Image (tube, grey):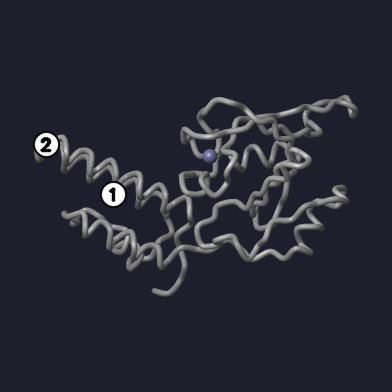
Amino acid sequence: MMTEKFIKNEQLNFIKTQITLIKDSVRKNLPPTVLAAVIDLANAKILDLIPNASLDQQKMLDLSKLKSDDEYEQYVQRLSDFLRPFPRVTEQQLKKMFPKNKKLKLPDLSQIDHSQLTYLSWNDLGSNKKFIVYELEGTMAGIECKLTPTSKKNICSFCNGFGEVAYFSTVTKAKKSKNPDYYKAIGNLICTDSSECNKKITNVEYLTTFLKDSLGM
Ligand SMILES: [Zn+2]
């Protein structure tokens, strides 16, 4: 179906990084065979990203024939029309995800662009908390993290981008431990501003690991 939204936010971000790579290679005036190899590799990685793509979708993803900046821009624009939006969640659903938090501060959902969202997140700076919501194995899951501000810019564990980060930690009941009272804290440097992170994230590997660990999955 040509109207099917088949591209995830992080996948389009990944495609954009491949285009940047190609443009950088063009600028370096590489020998034509080397440049062709760079483009081939980028194209293969993009097709690998969505292994179940139909033939029409594969054609749409194919960037091997593109030359000008305009063509790349049109290509990204066209793919943007096929972005799968983040599932709509209601305030009620969010409250249910954090039943222990009686003073839960919710984000203004109407102000969040759901089309370019890998994960939904908001900070409650009054209580130094960050909330992360993500569809994990078909179910919406949420975790609450403690936020500790940092003064230096650093690499974010979710998106691998360099920017304003804070230290986020969450306590998890470690599954492997035989001692039922054993709690393991996990923490990481993650972008403070999740809308920035959502613009940069190119895969969900770390995000899902972090969520699964903290949920004890
Ligand atoms: Zn990030």
Q: Are circles 1 and 2 on residues that touch, CB within 8 Å?
A: no
Give the residue type at disc 2: Asn
Determine the residue positioned at 46% across, 71% down: 4
Mark 2, Cα crowd under 10 Å, few <14 / some 14-19 / many 20+, is: few
For residue 50, above or below residue 166: below
* x and y percentages locating residue 54 in the rendered image: 38, 65
Determine the residue positioned at 60% across, 30% down: 189
* x and y percentages locating residue 145 in the rendered image: 73, 38
Instruction: Classify residue 167 by image quadrant.
Output: top right
Q: Is residue 46 left or right of residue 70?
A: right
Quadrant for the N terminus in the image: bottom left
Give the residue type at disc 1: Asn
Quadrant for the C terminus in the image: top right
For residue 193, above or below residue 176: below
Q: Which residue is mark 2?
A: 29
- Between 178 and 22, the one lying in front of the other is 22
Label 2: which secondary element: loop
User: Which labelled disc corresponds to residue 43?
Assistant: 1
For residue 104, above or below residue 130: below
* x and y percentages locating residue 57 in the rendered image: 36, 65
Mark 1 or mark 2, whichever is nearer to me? 2
